Amino acid sequence: QSALTQPASVSASPGQSITISCTGTSRDVGYYNLVSWYHQHPGKAPKLMIFEVTKRPSGVSYRFSGSKSGNTASLTISGLQAEDEGDYYCFSYAGSGTLVFGGGTKLTVL
Amino acid sequence: DVQLVESGGGLVQPGGSLKLSCAASGFTFSGSAIHWVRQASGKGLEWLGRIRSKGNNDATAYAASVRDRFTISRDDSKSTAYLLMNSLKIEDTALYYCARLGYGDFEGWGQGTLVTVSS
């Protein structure tokens, strides 16, 4: 049950698009379509941005989208805005009732 | 709205025990699974475990890192879940969240309770 692998940081300018990858194994990300993405501002609780790989909760901007290929899930943010800064975590079901987070990616909007 | 409020955090010596509470409102607690997640200062999120509803036999599951030391339970009459932590280590120092996960639009997180393990 190892943490999913994410890049430590990513940065881009306002208006640009970025993609954050989340690499697991054939026993978690690759097997189940149960990947979520969370956004966390410093000192705040995480906020759900994507669930079940591609679904967006109501109230989350269409600029956020999720996908998966093999053992890697991805979060894409288009039209970057300053408020998108913060930490992003992927989260996957890993079988036998267990779940696992990615190590987190710090997004900086330049 | 889903509301979760953690309590019970504090300072505890290494080797000690602590029981956290998670008071829920705004949803049907008895039918919901509840998860516990922690975050050490400046570090990432770590899933600790979850308890399912009585309809699912109160089934629990834990991360390997805490399986032998932490126990999750629930009292549906009080809409409260608990995290009992034994044999605490310095590295257990973190902000502990309870959360209602896996419910899409109806997810929710508490604001966390701080546990400090130190002599």
Image: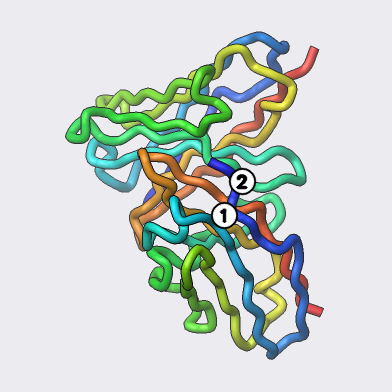
Colouring convention used in this rendered image of the protein = rainbow
Residue A56 position (above or below residue B98): below
Q: Please give the name of the residue rendered at 67% of the width and 47% of the height, measured from the top-left corner.
A: B44
Residue B118, horizontal then vertical, whole percent: 77, 17
Q: Are marks 1 and 2 in contact (CB under 8 Å)?
A: yes
Spatial CA distance of label 1 from label 2 is 9 Å
Residue B12, horizontal then vertical, whole percent: 69, 14
Q: Nearer the viewer, residue A22 or B12?
A: A22
Residue B79, horizontal then vertical, whole percent: 32, 31
Secondary structure beneath label 1? loop
Q: Which residue is mark 1?
A: A46
Residues packed near mark 2 inside 10 Å, few (<14), some (14 to 19) or many (20 plus):
many
Residues packed near mark 1 inside 10 Å, few (<14), some (14 to 19) or many (20 plus):
many
Asked where in the image residue B104 lies, by quadrant, the reply is bottom left
**Residue A87 showing in the rendered view:** no
Residue A68 position (above or below residue B114): below
Q: Which residue is mark 2?
A: B45
Residue A59 position (above or below residue A80): above
**Residue B111 showing in the rendered view:** yes
Q: Please give the name of the residue rendered at 49% of the width and 78% of the height, measured from the top-left corner.
A: A65
Left of B93 or right of it: where is B6?
left
Q: Nearer the viewer, residue A98 or B99?
A: A98
Asked where in the image residue B105 lies, by quadrant, the reply is bottom left
Look at label 1 and name its amino acid: Pro
